[in-house]
Amino acid sequence: QVTLVESGGGLVQPGGSLRLSCAASGRAFSSYAMGWFRQAPGKEREFVAGITWSGGSTYYGDSVKGRFTISGDNAKKAVYLQMNSLKPADTAVYYCAGKSVISPLWTGRSWSQYDAWGQGTQVTVSS
């Protein structure tokens, strides 16, 4: 099992950028597929981005495709979410999630598919 801690949230103007980080502790991180989710007030939790255990594949939710980039660093036990061209609609609490997997090709777009979650970091996009 791993413990996940997000950081890097904050207040940014529309059109700006932020980079979120997710630090993991635990021995098995290298066999974890990772994802980012977000939840805005009054809205359902939404899949944002995912990366396979091997790091060879990334995939995104439609609302962030082309603006956000997920990446990972197994040596540092970290996953990142680079967010560009931010919009007010991106305002939400962002959560990091992990799933212990056997297949390096595993992907997941549902919160319930993961078995480790961080506490979240607030991102506010406003002028």
Image (cartoon, rainbow, N blue to C red):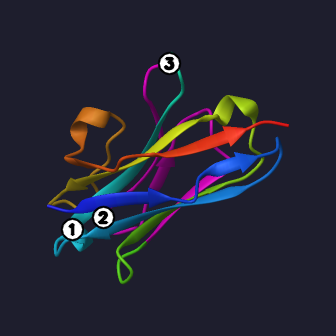
Mark-to-mark CA distance, 1 and 3: 31 Å
**Counting residues from the N terminus, which is met first, the one under dot 2 or under dot 1?**
1
In percent of width and height, residue 69 lies at 59, 57
Q: Is residue 104 visible?
A: no
Q: Which residues are magenta?
A: 44-72
At label 1, the amino acid type is Ser
At label 2, the amino acid type is Trp
**Counting residues from the N terminus, which is met first, the one under dot 2 or under dot 3?**
3
Which residue corresponds to the image point at 34% horizontal and 74% vertical from the top-left? 77
At label 3, the amino acid type is Lys
In percent of width and height, residue 57 lies at 43, 60
Q: Which residue position holds label 1? A: 31
The quadrant of the image that shows the N terminus is bottom left
Q: Which residue position holds label 3? A: 43
- Judge by depth and name the residue closer to the eye, 30 or 87: 87
Q: Secondary structure at mark 1?
A: helix
Which residue corresponds to the image point at 19% horizontal and 59% vertical from the top-left? 103
Mark-to-mark CA distance, 2 and 3: 29 Å
- Tell which tag, 2 or 3, sits nearer the viewer: 3
Q: Is residue 59 magenta?
A: yes
- Check if mark 2's residue and mark 1's residue have beta carbons within 8 Å: yes
Q: Secondary structure at mark 3?
A: loop
Q: Which residue position holds label 2? A: 53
